[in-house]
Image (cartoon, rainbow, N blue to C red):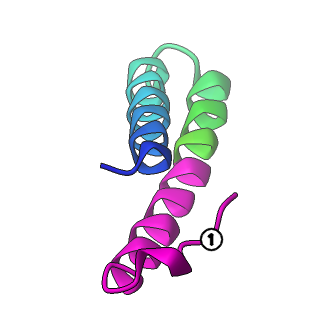
Amino acid sequence: MDPRLAQLLQKTSLYGTLAMYYEHIDPEKHIYFYRKHFEYEMQLVQLYWALQGTMENPSQIECY
């Protein structure tokens, strides 16, 4: 697995879990962590599709 993809999966999961934890405890923290989760989720999806499009030619993968 691409290390960038693995890192984004980890962050997406972490912030999603924290958002769920704070959902009924602290609404402000819930919103904060949900926004972070959504931010990393969008990056994850973009990277995933970028990698899928370049699987035939790995030299085309853009470095971030």
Instruction: List x then y, in percent, for residue 40.
Output: 56, 49
Instruction: List x then y, in percent, for residue 27.
Output: 59, 26
For this rendering, which residue is in front, 14 or 20?
Answer: 14
- The residue shown at (32%, 78%) is 55
Quadrant in the rendering for residue 16:
top left
Instruction: List x then y, in percent, for residue 50.
Output: 47, 77
Which residue is under mark 1?
62
Query: How would you rate the neighbour count of disc 1 (Cα within 10 Å): few for under 14, some for 14-19, many for 20 or more?
Result: few
Name above or below for residue 20 compared with residue 8.
above
- The residue shown at (61%, 52%) is 39
The type of residue carrying mark 1 is Glu
Horizontal side of 27 relative to 64 (left or right) equals left
* Highlighted range, magenta: 38-64
Judging from the image, what secondary structure is the residue with disc 1 in? loop
For this rendering, which residue is in front, 10 or 20?
Answer: 10
Name above or below for residue 8 compared with residue 48.
above
